[in-house]
Image (spheres, helix red, strand yellow):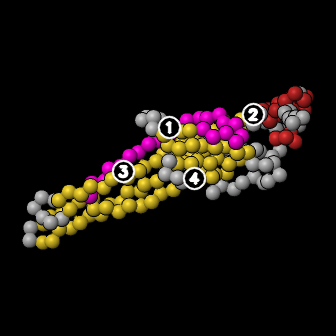
Amino acid sequence: MRPLLALLATSLTLATPALAIETAPSSTSAENATPKSGYVTFSGLDGSSRMTAVTVGDTAGFPAQRRMVVPYTDSVTLRPGKPPIVHEGVIETGTDTLFRARAEHQGVVTLDVSISTLTLRSMKHARVPGSDATIDLPDEVHESFKGTLSIADGETVPLFASTSGKPLGTLTWNTMPSALTTPTPN
């Protein structure tokens, strides 16, 4: 004998065709079969340029990093009668980017953009009192932009740091021709 709940569920499924959910193909399913793809080009103030392939609707986004490691003398330990111990540090200067194309409508793409830059403005040096050792004093500048932009195919927009208002560079969106395949992340 079957449990009453299972019997009731079977009866409802057989007797009520409205419980079965079907999705009819839309008239635009051919248009939406291949998601739109394109390229986001970020051009920094330092003359560097980075092109990233993105697909509209991809929830992960496409992160990229461009960094340079700069070593420096972080600190010095002094011990009586012994040579000083130098402690090295590193600064990772460069740019981190993340682009996610959320939607596209009539050639205009809605992009989530996150750009973060770290620049080493200068490296000063200071003598450690009581020794001949010196330490480095890095002067770093951190700027970032995080927001959502609506940008048309072929359009270039300037980007400014969210807190300082200083320019970071420009961003360009170009739709990938539909004959090409969906890009792979870089």
Whole-number angstrom distance, CA of label 1 to CA of label 4: 16 Å
In this rendering, the answer to whether 133 lies above or below 50 is below
Amino acid type, residue under disc 1 in the picture: Phe
Label drawn at residue 105? 2
Task: Tell me the CA gap for discs 4 and 2.
Answer: 27 Å
Is residue 140 inside the magenta stretch?
yes
The image quadrant where one finds the C terminus is bottom right
Of callouts 1 and 4, the N-terminal one: 4
Examine the structure image and report whether residue 51 is included in the region drawn in magenta: no
The residue at the point 60 percent across, 38 percent down is 157
Q: Which mark is residue 121?
A: 3
Cα separation, mark 2 vs mark 3, equals 42 Å
> Label 1 neighbourhood size at 10 Å, few (<14), some (14-19), many (20+)?
some
Look at the image and give the residue range highlighted in magenta: 136-157
Contact check, label 2 and label 3, Cβ < 8 Å: no
Label 4 crowd (10 A; few <14 / some 14-19 / many >=20) = few
The answer to whether the residue labelled 1 contacts the one labelled 4, judged by CB atoms less than 8 Å apart, is no
- In primary-sequence order, the first of circles 4 and 2 is 4
Reply above or below: 142 against 137: above
Residue matched to label 1: 160
